[in-house]
């Protein structure tokens, strides 16, 4: 089978799709399929076992989108099927022009994400579902056209699947497929890892894109509200400069880190923290749990489908800084709770085995070709 993988971001970019797309591409390549990739990038992506084609982000938006459509069309014409984790409009147009089926890995509401980027709406994804207006309606129409045309749509959470079906995507073509837990390599002893990050005392960790969605100012406040607690942040994004200006001496910014170093960060930390205002099923949560580290998170989107309050982490309402600080305080003041949550963390994502998850994607692609 010849597969074209399309992703809006690619390493060294930070974020879920930048982890997921290369892993799927490598899995399919290992399985003997011919794989090519189309992405956007600020500079030439590193060499892989398969060809990675890219459109420069330095191009003006309209030109960049047209170049993306043309590139997807050209490469899709040489493929049997397209697997897209982003650039849905360009994937839809390119695959349709090439007369090829495509399978979607949905990570959010594309209409909401586009509306946020354009400054059309504020708030969260749930509030967006009842918003009205011409521009909102146009973005929804584009989203619905792109998803209804797909041979299959994968959603990492039942929360997002329910939304996709409400947009008119046939229920039989939408399924829940959780983000795969990363294979955790042999890591150095935890004490050694803590020293490598300069950790001294109770420490929280965050890894991911530094965006408005993550509401990291709440994480900064929560860590600062509990005496002696430090916060280490790995990643980059539009919010980094603002967050660095807000951060106190208890916060350390590492910048973007390779996947192994992120796993080492989570293993070294006492807990991972996620303060997002909206989410679907974040990769960072699965990574932290796979590394054996509990998660303190806001109860948004599909987070509660993987983080179970009192079992492998603690959950609080979104936007409630006091509740988040209270959860951090409770976690570090209760040795028994902390030990119990840590003992359950890795086992709680054992079912998200990489091969089992990616085999379902392979089967959907083969079905689309058939």
Image (cartoon, rainbow, N blue to C red):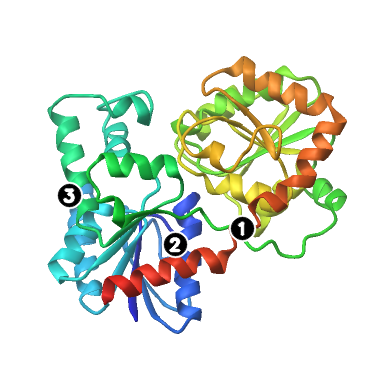
The residue drawn where x is 76% and y is 23% is: 330
Look at the image and tell me in which quarter the N terminus lies: bottom left
Q: Position of residue 172 (x, y in %)?
A: 30, 55
Q: Nearer the viewer, residue 299 or 15?
A: 299
Residue at disc 2, secondary structure: helix
Residue at disc 1, secondary structure: loop
Name the N-terminal-most of marks 2 and 3.
2
Crowd rating for badge 3 (residues with CA inside 10 Å; few <14, some 14–19, many 20+): some
Q: Nearer the viewer, residue 335 or 277?
A: 335
3D distance between C-alphas at marks 3 and 1: 33 Å
Q: Which mark is residue 21?
A: 2
Residue at disc 3, secondary structure: helix
Q: Position of residue 112 (x, y in %)?
A: 30, 35
Q: Which mark is residue 320?
A: none
Q: Which residue is mark 1?
A: 351
Q: Which residue is mark 3?
A: 145
Look at the image and tell me in which quarter the C terminus lies: bottom left
Q: Is residue 84 above or below residue 110?
A: below
3D distance between C-alphas at marks 2 and 3: 23 Å
The residue drawn where x is 52% and y is 20% is: 319
């Amino acid at each position: 089978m010849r597969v074209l993988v399309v992703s809006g971001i690619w390493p060294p970019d930070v974020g879920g799709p930048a982890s997921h797309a290369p892993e799927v591409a490598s899995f399919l390549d290992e399985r003997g399929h011919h794989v090519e990739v189309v992405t956007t990038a600020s500079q030439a992506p590193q060499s892989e076992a398969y060809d990675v084609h890219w459109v420069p982000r330095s191009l003006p938006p309209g030109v960049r989108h047209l170049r993306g459509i043309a590139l997807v069309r050209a490469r899709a014409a040489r493929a049997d099927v397209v697997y897209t984790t982003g650039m849905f409009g360009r994937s839809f147009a390119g695959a349709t022009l090439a007369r090829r089926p495509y399978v979607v890995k949905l990570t959010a509401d594309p209409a909401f994400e586009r509306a946020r980027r354009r400054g059309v709406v504020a708030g969260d994804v749930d509030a967006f579902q009842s918003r009205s207006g011409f521009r909102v309606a146009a973005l929804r129409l584009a989203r619905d056209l792109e998803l209804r045309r797909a041979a299959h749509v994968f959603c990492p959470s039942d929360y997002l699947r329910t939304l996709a079906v409400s947009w008119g995507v046939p229920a039989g073509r939408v399924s829940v497929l959780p983000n795969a837990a990363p294979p955790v390599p042999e890591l150095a002893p935890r004490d050694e890892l803590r020293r490598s990050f300069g950790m001294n005392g109770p420490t929280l960790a965050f890894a991911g894109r530094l965006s408005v969605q993550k509401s990291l100012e709440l994480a900064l406040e929560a860590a600062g509200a509990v005496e002696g607690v430090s916060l280490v942040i790995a990643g980059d994004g539009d919010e980094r400069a603002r967050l660095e200006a807000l951060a106190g001496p208890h916060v350390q910014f590492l910048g973007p880190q390779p996947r192994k170093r992120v796993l080492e960060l989570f293993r070294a930390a006492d807990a991972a923290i996620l303060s997002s205002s909206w989410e679907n099923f974040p990769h960072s949560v699965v990574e932290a749990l796979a590394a054996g580290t509990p998660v303190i998170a806001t109860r948004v989107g599909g987070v509660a489908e993987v983080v179970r309050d009192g079992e492998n982490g603690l959950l609080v309402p979104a936007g409630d800084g006091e509740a988040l600080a209270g959860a951090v305080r409770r976690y570090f003041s209760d040795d028994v709770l902390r030990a119990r949550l840590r003992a359950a963390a890795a086992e709680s994502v054992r079912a998200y085995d990489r091969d089992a998850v990616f085999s379902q994607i392979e089967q959907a692609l083969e079905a689309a070709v058939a």
